[in-house]
Amino acid sequence: MRRTLRHPGAVGTHEEHRSALAADLRAAVAGDVDFSTTARALTSMDASNYRRVPAGTVAPRDADDVAAVLEVCRAHGTPVVARGGGTSIGGQATGTGVVLDLTRHMARLVSLDPERRTAVVQPGLVLDRLREAARPYGLTFGPDPSTHSRCTLGGMIGNNACGAHSVAWGTTADNVRSLETVSYRGARLTLGQDGRGAPSGLLDLVGRNLALLRTGYPAGLPRRISGYALDALLPERGVDVARSFCGSEGTLGVVTEATVRLVPLPEEPVLVVLGYADESAAAEAAAGLLEYRPLTVEGMAADLVRGAEGLPRGGAWLFCEVEGAGAARTLVRAADALDATVVADPAGQRALWRIREDAAGTATRLPGGEAWPGWEDCAVPPARLGAYLREFRALLADFGLRGVPYGHFGDGCVHVRIDFDLWTERGVRHFRRFSEAVADLVVAHGGSLSGEHGDGQARAELLPKMYGEELVGLFGAVKDVWDPDGGLNPGMLVRPRPLDEGLRFAGLPLVGVGREAARCVGVAKCRVDGPGSGPGVMCPSYRVTGEEKHSTRGRARLLHEMALGEVITDGWRSEEVREALDLCLSCKGCRSDCPVGVDMAAYKAEFLDRHYAGPFGFLRRPRSHWTMGRLPRWLDLFGRTLNPVMGLPFAARLAGVTPERTMPRVAERTFTSWFAERATTRPPDLTLWPDTFTEHLAPEVGRAAVRVLEAAGLGVTLPQGWVCCGLTYVSTGQLGAARRVMRRTLDVLEGVEGPVGGTVGTEGSVAGVSGVIGPIVVLEPSCAATLRSDLPELLPDDPRAARVAASVRTFAEALETLAPDWEPPRLDRPVTGQTHCHQHAVLGDAADRRLRERAGLTGELAGGCCGLAGNFGFEPGHYEVSVACAEDQLLPALREAPTGAEVLADGFSCRTQIGDLTPGRGRHVAEVLAEGVDAGGL
């Protein structure tokens, strides 16, 4: 039950004021009030270059809660900013007061009317959830930014978001029918056409400035997002208050519900990719294609794509979606392109569109450096785009900067990330001078400083260049009509903070995990909305909990704040960071799925290593770090003698393992002992890696692999001594021990004849090494990934590490490269199972797919993470999350598999999870192929 606030008012010190504000909010609202260090750190940044630390966050349950929050905050003189997915690029989703998290409780699709082609949505609803609900009726929401899997409708309204289909379906403002809003003073307004919902004084203000509104906005500009859309209030434009509100960036009111227009889905979408000689040619062609009514005209050049497959000949491309094969043929004939590719297959279209959707992150990773937003999305009239891009590229060169333009060429809108030096005072001054110069260039071409993401803090200071002082002054007057107290998102769009103030890089160390975490630009691809909501691996724990602190972005933000030391003040001893990382499965999914390559598994390992460092730090470590974290050594020392101990009732507690798990059983005979007793005269072609799991827990996999490799005509040898990749030490943050294990392994591999991998042969063989012949073939994907990635990263000064990493091959890669003419046995059966998350992230599975195809093993393996993830699923407090991760993709795939399907899982963890949670048993592909080899007498 809500309580009425009786005695509001600011009190005492800043900390006392925050405490009083939090208490009053908890008394007034039914939603979640969180003023913790973690909550503040998680919302200090969005997808921009800016950082503002809030007092706290509130997740309101409904419109009444929103009104109550605003009432309390106004009484305390505290500003409020509404936040959706936090993917804004101008800084407008951050604030110093209270952040309203509208994604937690106000995220419903209220209703959908297929007859009227409308939907009523709450502001926290993710766009893809609306599109999924509309799809069965042949409908969709037209605007579709590349962040469609995590951006919210409220955020899209705030920024007037657009997306690839805007040439056909317009901006968000074009697709909003009415809005329910709450003002900072608590007025509840229903906004619509014919002046409906206009606050007192707004229409009078417009009436006194009709001439300015009719002449002050640039013409012929479909992507004019900058400033307030006050011309929507002109009589000849229907006095559309809802439309004028779109793009106001949360500075006028808080949306609590919206009625939006839906549009018909194309019945036969065809993707036409047109190749042009260069970017200018593509840009100049784009405007001429609009008369053929394409649904998209997206452009990008070769310096963004960097070797992507499936594109036609050329140095730049236009991605044009059309309705039907006939329209595709017409467009190709009219395009005058160098080359063209027409793709009707939905899977092929998705693969190509993924190149475009990942561009915001891909453009951040320039060769030899990083690039940032800051001049992200200006727009010019489409007919002027080619000329603008040539001058823009020249301006970049004049300033010694690099950037990769791409975007909505059909609408004249250009996205670009630029390698600004935002770490030093000199670099920040350079950033300001460039921003001012490029604003002049955009205005000279009749353009808009923002063509999609809004002005925020990044461009609002420059609006007088575009609109002039008089119209910008009118923006301020309109803001004062809607929000006379200035409590809604102050410093954004109107009376803005300087564009070079409050940058998130200020004070951050230039090296270390904080610098690495700062690579996260906040595009939030890790915020996949719930189990079963898409392919890929990242981020398993967020898919389960839905909590920002369990996303890759959330963890990166906490590490960023830890490095700054302002909000999180206890550095490497931070419990907030440790708690957020506790549910990180170290799956490495972010290493490949994150567009900017954030590697949270590596950051977690470093954090744990430092968190437990110092005197008596070893006593604070979980017991599982000493048991499972050092499992290779325990198994090497004690082997099968551990079985009686692990069978005791108290064994799990003693080992720091959750009681829900069955302790694994050590094999009676190791793989290497079996191999040593074999008689063979075949000269070796490769070295098979006896990883800990194959050696002690699943030697049948090693035996099967030897049979298959020999059937393929390959000789096999093993390293001459105990070797270990160091995986378990790395995953538990024992990096000193991991390095010692890795160096000892390199010493074993080095032998007596010369350094590891003296040369790498044409087939990846390692030459001049005693005990290492040919490539090193690793059966366990997690160990192969550790050798290929962690080994050289942890031992960067040891050249042996890089050479061993380069020699690592998976089982399928070895068969494909060393025995290319060998035909595997035809097994002709369906398969299901799991591609190991480390294989997905580090190794790739293309060779595995080809091997299965040649063997007649049909069907796809599940993506995602099995949830066991080495030690993770065995540790106390992780069991429920571990099982829920398996329910994301793996277990549904097993349940839906055809009868008799072979369950494939090359990873020991994946096979263990399958055995624990299902009646079935997973097998390594080597075991399945070995059965076929034996049956065929090969």
Image (cartoon, helix red, strand yellow):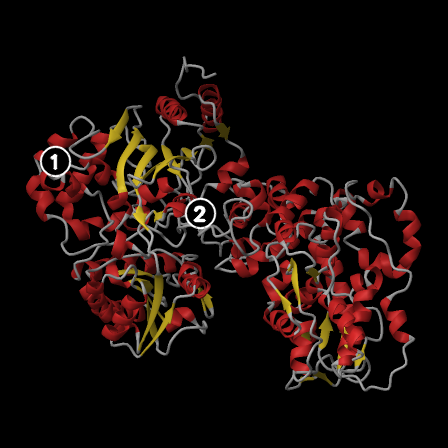
Q: Residue furthest left?
A: 211
Task: Kindly identify the residue that appears in the image at 53 percent across and 54 percent down.
Answer: 517
Task: Kindly identify the residue that appears in the image at 11 percent across and 30 percent down.
Answer: 204
**Marker disc for residue 150:** 2
Counting residues from the start of the chain, the first of labels 1 and 2 encountered is 2
Q: On screen, 403 above or below 122?
A: below
- Position of 323 with respect to 816 (left or right) is left
Q: Residue furthest front?
A: 899
- Front: mark 1 or 2: 2
- Position of 765 with respect to 168 (left or right) is right
In terms of image quadrants, where is residue 774? Answer: bottom right
In terms of image quadrants, where is residue 862? Answer: bottom right
Q: Are marks 1 and 2 in contact (CB under 8 Å)?
A: no
Element carrying mark 2? loop
Amino acid under label 2? Arg
- Residue identifier under label 1: 206
Could you tell me residue 594's position as x and y percent?
A: 51, 57
Element carrying mark 1? helix
Could you tell me residue 129's position as x and y percent?
A: 43, 44
Judging depth in this view, the residue of 451 and 364 nearest the camera is: 451
Could you tell me residue 62's position as x and y percent?
A: 41, 27
**Marker disc for residue 832:** none
Q: Local crowd at mark 2 within 10 Å, few (<14), some, or many (≥20)? A: many
Q: On screen, 527 above or below 287?
A: above
Q: Is residue 498 visible?
A: no
